[in-house]
Image (spheres, rainbow, N blue to C red):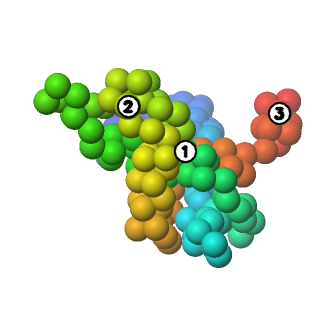
Amino acid sequence: MKPQDLLPSYVLEHNARIAEEAEEEKETGMIRLEQEDFGTYLIVDEDTGKDRLVQVDYDYPSLASTFGWSPRKVVRKVQGKRCKHLNTDGTVLCRTCGATASMFIASATDYLDEHIGDTAEDPGYFFNPDCDEAYHG
Ligand SMILES: [Zn+2]
């Protein structure tokens, strides 16, 4: 007999409901990275097949971050120590080491090119706030 069998049914139902809700919240959807013409990228919603073009290079660092890139991929040393670029997300100059936005964007672009076809959790590209509101009543 499993320990679970000893629990009254209302507890089991309650647990099942919690598990179900957790499942629903987890459903943020997955996105897939695809290459588009002229050095642009397409993100595709794995569930719906909807896509979105990302063509502004200043959007590449945040897009690349979704797939695991970080500004730290740009290696710069300040007084012998590797700069962590803590004061930039890749779209502005790092004031600590002087790495420019274009250096981060170049790094993010290389990263994206190497990760075409990868999937990641959707951080909000296809997130629909109206839908969420309806869900919460
Ligand atoms: Zn830096």
Compute the Cα span from label 3 to label 2.
43 Å
Label 1 beta carbon less than 8 Å to ligand 1: no
Within 10 angstroms of label 1, few (less than 14), some, or many (20 or more) residues?
Answer: many
Residue 98 circle label: 2
Residue 11 circle label: none
The first of marks 3 and 1 along the sequence is: 1
Q: Nearer the viewer, residue 37 or 64?
A: 37
Residue 111 placement (x, y as % from top left): 41, 59
Q: Which element type, helix, strand or loop, lies under badge 3?
A: helix
Q: What residue is disc 1 on? A: 62
Q: Nearer the viewer, residue 29 or 114?
A: 114
Task: Specify the amino acid type for callout 3.
Answer: Glu
Dividing the picture into quarters, in which one does residue 14 lie? top right
Q: Is residue 69 visible?
A: yes
Q: Which element type, helix, strand or loop, lies under badge 1?
A: helix
The first of marks 3 and 2 along the sequence is: 2
Q: Nearer the viewer, residue 132 or 79?
A: 79
Residue at screen point 66% across, 44% down: 124
Dividing the picture into quarters, in which one does residue 16 lie? top right
Which of the two discs, 3 and 2, sits closer to the camera?
A: 2
Q: Is residue 90 above or below residue 52?
A: above
Q: What residue is disc 3 on? A: 133
